[in-house]
Amino acid sequence: MTERTLEVKLKSGLQARQAALFVQEANRFSSDIYLEKGTRKVNAKSIMGIMSLAIGRGVEVTLSADGHDEEEAVEALSGIIEDEN
């Protein structure tokens, strides 16, 4: 399992459009991928799960993946979360 704690740097947080792009990217990987905020942990391949976390800019989240492409998944998805655009 690969895990990384990140600060969300997206201007509007991980909402609507950015959440959809995040989920689309997560679904490219075969690993099980999860995003955690506080005590809530959701499947990162689920748009409803991601939206339910209501992740805003500056929030700290933990991204984890388990599977044969876990390192690539965490690296790619971290790039989306930490993008300042």
Image: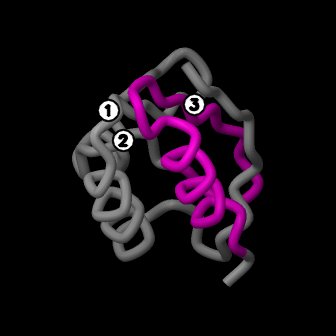
Who's the residue at 39% across and 26% down the image? 67
Where in the figure is residue 21, as x and y percent of width and height? 37, 70
User: Is 49 located above or below residue 65 in the figure?
Assistant: below
Q: Is residue 43 magenta?
A: no
Where in the figure is residue 30, as x and y percent of width and height? 28, 40
> What span is in magenta?
55-83
Q: Amino acid at mark 3?
A: Lys
User: Is 44 located above or below residue 14 in the figure?
Assistant: above
Q: Amino acid at mark 1?
A: Asn
What is the number of callouts on the image?
Answer: 3
Mark earlier in primary sequence (3, 1): 3
Q: Which residue is mark 1?
A: 43
Mark earlier in primary sequence (3, 2): 3
Looking at the picture, tell me which residue is in the foreground, 65 or 85.
65
Q: Determine whether label 1 and label 2 are within 8 Å by CB.
A: yes
Element at label 3: strand
